[in-house]
């Protein structure tokens, strides 16, 4: 019984933190978020957190969204798995009579046509379940074009459609599509501790008092409940400012002279309903150029993407020589950004690095390199060509995949230099900005040494690393150019290998 009480407390706190993760966006300058509600009065099951936007925001589809309704499901264990059949089981969402899909169907009938619905859980989609193939790696929306693929009910996707259609007692697939269109499924979402870190980061960014990591409690949990008790749970920007003022949470904002101007580049839409911390006029959205993580048909990295990024960054530096870069973007774009703001540019930058423990501000002088490990470097001859390949394994190992791609597609490569950390790849292998900058410099110096006799050799970069490290490596582009950066199909939903992006000379 005691464990059940603790689990219920944690579940309540988890919902409160999802609320604050979105509510603090109200205080961002130029935010599209205009209202965030904690435990709304409907639609039932999707009323845990409701976010409203004005102007409407874009996702991966053509329509713009005015509201997002979220069902939050926290679990004590993170090892749980679920699949498409669980969406027709009331017990999956702790209900007795109605399943997740039935609640979605009911919500569709009462919510605005421009609304979207999200299911957010700490459980993960089961390996091999068809549902895993139906979730967009871009914004976690259901890939209806893949679900409704004109196959029969005997096919893999047909079995999903049949199960859902019959459960909802719908006459055909067209009626089913109108129910599930735009549903977002956020599986394996952040832990309680990761949300605590993220909320503290966002609070600091908008001038709200963060909670000390040394405290046993987390004040924002109880504050969310008090908002509900006081019937203040539907917050606008003005209401949140007044509430924070009443609670003594407002901090003095930095002066304009000292502040870094937040600018954002988005080519990958993240799962939370935020506006990435930069005003619309300081945000470059490339969502129309990509579908999930992949270039739209007919788009080209060099011709279509590169000029937009370079023009945006050069325009931004005219506004401020101190920039905070927020890159919900491909690794190639991070490298390109570094090449624009290279070591001779005199632009001061700090980077918002997102990861498992939430977002952090990384700087090249943040002290994180003290005692930090360096790369172990190995070289291997793979041919007689003049070019060089770099396999940079930080977040994930890349050498095997890079070798396979080189052997099939890049016969001009003579050597592969592999960079790996002694502890092996991992999501938290890089300690901070100074550590990332140190590792980038190590790579640059090594490339300079081994290409000294052949300055025209093309350097091919295969990397699984934080965007910040790619940014700092891009700042050294003059030492390693000419070079090509490659993108890997980590979602394995398209070409399932590497594809070249930018050629930097």
Image (tube, rainbow, N blue to C red):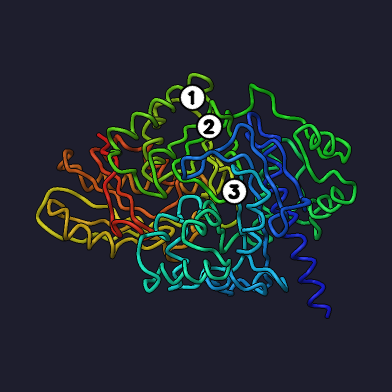
From where the camera sits, is residue 364 visible?
A: no
Residue position marked by numbered label 3 in the rendering? 116
Residue at 80% of width from left, 60% of height from top? 216
In screen coordinates, is 341 left or right of 52? left
Residue at 46% of width from left, 50% of height from top? 138
- Separation of marks 1 and 2 at Cα, in angstroms: 8 Å
Residue at 68% of width from left, 68% of height from top? 98
Q: Which image quadrant: the N terminus? A: bottom right
Question: Which quadrant would residue 73 be assigned to in this image?
Answer: bottom right
Q: How crowded is mark 2: few (under 14 residues within 10 Å), some or many (20 or more)?
A: many
- Return the disc, 2 or 3, that comes first in the chain's sequence: 3
In screen coordinates, is 404 left or right of 179? left
- Percent position of residue 295, x then y: 34, 44
Residue position marked by numbered label 1 in the rendering? 316
Q: Is mark 1 on a helix, strand or loop?
A: helix
- Separation of marks 1 and 3 at Cα, in angstroms: 33 Å
- Return the disc, 1 or 2, that comes first in the chain's sequence: 2
Q: Which image quadrant: the C terminus? A: top left
Residue position marked by numbered label 2 in the rendering? 263
Q: Is mark 2 on a helix, strand or loop?
A: strand
């Amino acid at each position: 019984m005691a464990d059940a009480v603790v689990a219920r407390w944690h579940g309540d706190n988890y919902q409160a933190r999802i609320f604050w993760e979105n509510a603090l966006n109200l205080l961002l300058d130029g935010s599209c978020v205009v209202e965030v509600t904690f435990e709304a009065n409907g639609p039932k099951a999707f009323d845990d957190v409701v976010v409203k936007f004005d102007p409407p925001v874009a996702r991966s589809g053509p329509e713009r969204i005015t509201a997002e309704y979220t069902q939050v499901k926290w679990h004590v264990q993170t090892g749980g798995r679920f699949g498409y059949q669980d969406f027709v089981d009331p017990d999956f969402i702790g209900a007795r009579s109605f399943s997740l899909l039935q609640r979605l169907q009911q919500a569709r009938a009462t919510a605005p046509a421009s609304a979207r619905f999200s299911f957010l859980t700490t459980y993960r989609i089961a390996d091999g379940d068809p549902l895993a193939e139906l979730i967009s790696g871009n914004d976690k929306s259901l890939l209806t074009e893949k679900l409704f693929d004109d196959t029969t009910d005997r096919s893999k996707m047909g079995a999903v459609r049949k199960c859902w259609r019959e459960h909802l007692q719908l006459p055909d697939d067209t009626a089913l599509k109108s129910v599930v269109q735009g549903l977002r499924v956020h599986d394996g979402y952040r832990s309680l501790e990761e949300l605590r870190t993220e909320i503290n980061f966002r609070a600091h960014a908008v001038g709200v008092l963060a909670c000390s990591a040394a405290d046993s409690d987390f004040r924002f949990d109880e504050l969310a409940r008090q908002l509900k008790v006081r019937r203040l749970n539907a917050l606008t920007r003005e209401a949140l400012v007044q509430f924070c003022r009443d609670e003594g949470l407002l901090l003095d904002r930095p002066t304009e002279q000292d502040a870094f101007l937040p600018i954002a580049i988005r080519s990958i839409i993240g799962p939370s309903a935020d506006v990435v911390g930069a005003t619309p006029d300081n945000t470059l959205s490339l969502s129309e150029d990509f579908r999930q993580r992949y270039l739209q048909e007919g788009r080209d990295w060099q011709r279509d993407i590169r000029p937009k990024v370079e023009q945006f960054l050069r325009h931004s530096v005219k506004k401020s020589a101190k920039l905070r870069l927020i890159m919900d973007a491909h690794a190639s774009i991070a490298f390109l950004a570094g090449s624009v703001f290279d070591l001779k540019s005199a632009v001061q930058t700090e980077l918002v690095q997102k990861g498992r423990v939430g977002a952090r501000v990384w700087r090249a002088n943040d002290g994180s390199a003290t005692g930090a490990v360096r790369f172990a470097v190995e070289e291997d001859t793979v041919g007689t060509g003049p070019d060089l390949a770099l396999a940079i394994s930080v977040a994930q190992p890349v050498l095997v995949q890079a070798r396979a791609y080189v052997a099939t597609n890049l016969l001009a490569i003579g050597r592969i230099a592999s960079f790996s950390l002694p502890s092996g790849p991992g999501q938290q292998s890089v300690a901070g900005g100074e550590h990332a900058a140190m590792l980038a410099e190590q790579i640059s110096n090594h490339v300079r040494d081994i290409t000294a006799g052949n300055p025209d050799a093309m350097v091919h970069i295969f990397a699984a690393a934080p965007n910040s490290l790619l940014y700092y490596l891009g700042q050294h582009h003059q030492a390693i150019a000419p070079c090509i950066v490659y993108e890997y199909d980590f979602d394995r939903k398209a070409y399932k290998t590497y594809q070249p992006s930018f050629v930097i000379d």
